[in-house]
Image (cartoon, helix red, strand yellow):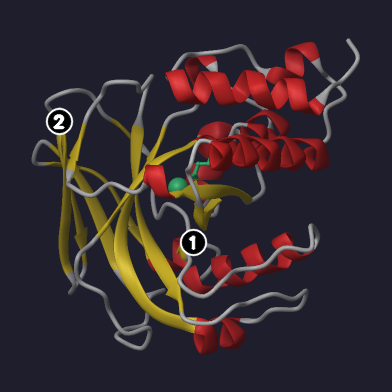
Amino acid sequence: MAMDLQEIARHIDEHQQQGREMDKVTLSYPSLKVEDAYKIQRICMEEAASRGDSLIGWKMGLTSAAKQKMVGVEEPIYGRLTSSMEMNSSVLSMEGLIHPKVEPELAFILKKDLKGENIRPRDVWMATDCVLPAIEVIDSRYRNFSFTLEDVVADNASSTKFLLGDQAFSPYEKAWDKMGVSILKNGEVQHEGVGSDVLGHPVRSVAELVNMLHKEDLGLKAGMVVLTGGFTEAVNVEEGDEILVDYEGLGTLSMSLS
Ligand code: 0L1
Ligand code: MG
């Protein structure tokens, strides 16, 4: 089948908007390249912008060995975060969701633009305003959460919603790589992780994102949110579930599914 990236993007965007499952794009287009998949992501963002949504940040996905093993894709990827994905309460409605999962993460909020090809952790610290506890909700549009690298990139790295904690912390508050995190569902611990599970240190995830974006001549803008990636495997959720993430020494963040 001839490959029309606009047409593929329209198809994916429709499924994202309606919360409907779809077949893997690579079944119809086996020659789809990762670069094409990122172009599809960009076109979907243009569609979102035409509906009044705006780009407010980026997420890194598959930044821990636990997550890579879970989905069988062995490299980090990025996705776009829009204003409509940010939750303004801790209640998540299941309406419009397919098979959501949640992940404990950290968000970095930038105070300066950051763009370049050899970005190191210290460049990230100089550009970071604060760090926030976060929970990401992912919901792959592909049946059974099953995809290739190209598919998942085209589906905006399964981005769906995210919740940020109210309390911001100084980037120097603690050694983020040493911070333990546990995620509980209905009072039972599901997984435990530590900051170093995220590419050695969550700051490295931001540096890697900037280096990856540079290949598309893109960068981060002051005020943007960056989700650095799950500390642990993602947890399946359904209506009625209560999620609590305990960030060692920093408190907790909760989410209720309704
Ligand atoms: O945020 C993530 O790590 C998810 C990236 C996409 C893979 C998935 O849907 O689990
Ligand atoms: Mg994530």
Which residue is under mark 1?
198
Viewer-nearest of discs 2 and 1: 2
Q: Residues within 10 Å of mark 1 (few under 14, many from 20)?
A: many
Residue 215, percent from left and from top: 81, 60
Q: Quadrant of residue 2?
A: top right
**Which amino acid, by three-letter code, is at mark 2?**
Asp
Q: CA distance from mark 2 to mark 1?
A: 26 Å
Q: Answer whether residue 149 is visible to the viewer in this image.
A: yes
**What's the residue at 34%, 21% (across, down)?**
96
**What's the residue at 17%, 46% (across, down)?**
90
Which residue is under mark 2?
241
Q: Residues within 10 Å of mark 2 (few under 14, many from 20)?
A: some
**Earlier-in-chain disc, 2 versus 1:** 1
Q: Answer whether residue 141 is visible to the viewer in this image.
A: no
Is residue 186 found left or right of 225 in the rendered image?
left
Is residue 125 found left or right of 191 in the rendered image?
right
Question: Secondary structure beneath disc 2?
Answer: loop
Q: Quadrant of residue 130?
A: bottom left
**Which amino acid, by three-letter code, is at mark 1?**
Val
Where is 63 relative to 69, above or below?
below
**What's the residue at 57%, 38% (across, down)?**
50
**What's the residue at 26%, 29% (across, down)?**
237
Residue 84, percent from left and from top: 39, 43
Is residue 96 found left or right of 147 in the rendered image?
left
Seen from this angle, which residue lies furthest left?
187
Where is 178 relative to 241, above or below?
below
